[in-house]
Image (cartoon, rainbow, N blue to C red):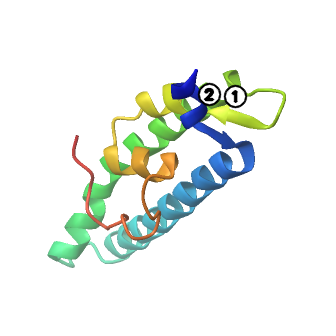
Amino acid sequence: MKDVEKHLQPLSFATGRVAAELRGLQNRLQRLEDTLEVMYQNPAVKLDAQSIGTLQDVDFLLQSITALSIYLEHLSMNTTDIGEVCVKDALATLTLRDMAARLSGGCDETASRSNHAELF
């Protein structure tokens, strides 16, 4: 029981962290859209390293969105009547370690974010 209590969080805290993750993904998607727009409008323009890196974000974005949806599904199944959820099982489903650490509250959510793809 002590292990479960260690992972209890107010529902607003757990969902707020998911919202922060989604805001970060939104920013990355915006950069991707901007890059694709430039490519579409200027087919003769050569891509620089930054543009290529932005295009590689597609895989990261897909993994992140998949992970967040699985995390939320687990949270919704484990919600108690008191407004707290045990995030242990939901965190175990995440293959992106940095995201799992942020969602667990185990690290500063903004300090651990980078523009580099997370490898597992």
Residue 114 in percent (x, y) is at: 32, 67
Q: Residues within 10 Å of mark 2 (few under 14, many from 20)?
A: few
Residue carrying label 1: 76
Residue carrying label 2: 73
Residue found 47% across the figure and 63% down from its top: 109
**Is residue 12 positioned above or below 3 on the image?**
below
**Is residue 49 positioned above or below 118 on the image?**
below
In this rendered view, identify the residue nearer to me: 109 or 42.
109
Q: How many marks?
A: 2
Residue 31 in percent (x, y) is at: 41, 71
In this rendered view, identify the residue nearer to me: 57 or 35.
57
Residue lying furthest front: 2
Give the quarter of the image for residue 56: bottom left
Residue 23 seen anywhere in this rendered image of the structure: yes
Residue lying furthest right: 81
Q: Quadrant of the N terminus?
A: top right
Task: Tell me the kind of residue under disc 1.
Answer: Ser
Q: Residues within 10 Å of mark 1 (few under 14, many from 20)?
A: few
**Is residue 8 positioned above or below 58 on the image?**
above
Give the quarter of the image for residue 81: top right
Residue 47 seen anywhere in this rendered image of the structure: no
Task: Tell me the kind of residue under disc 2.
Answer: Glu
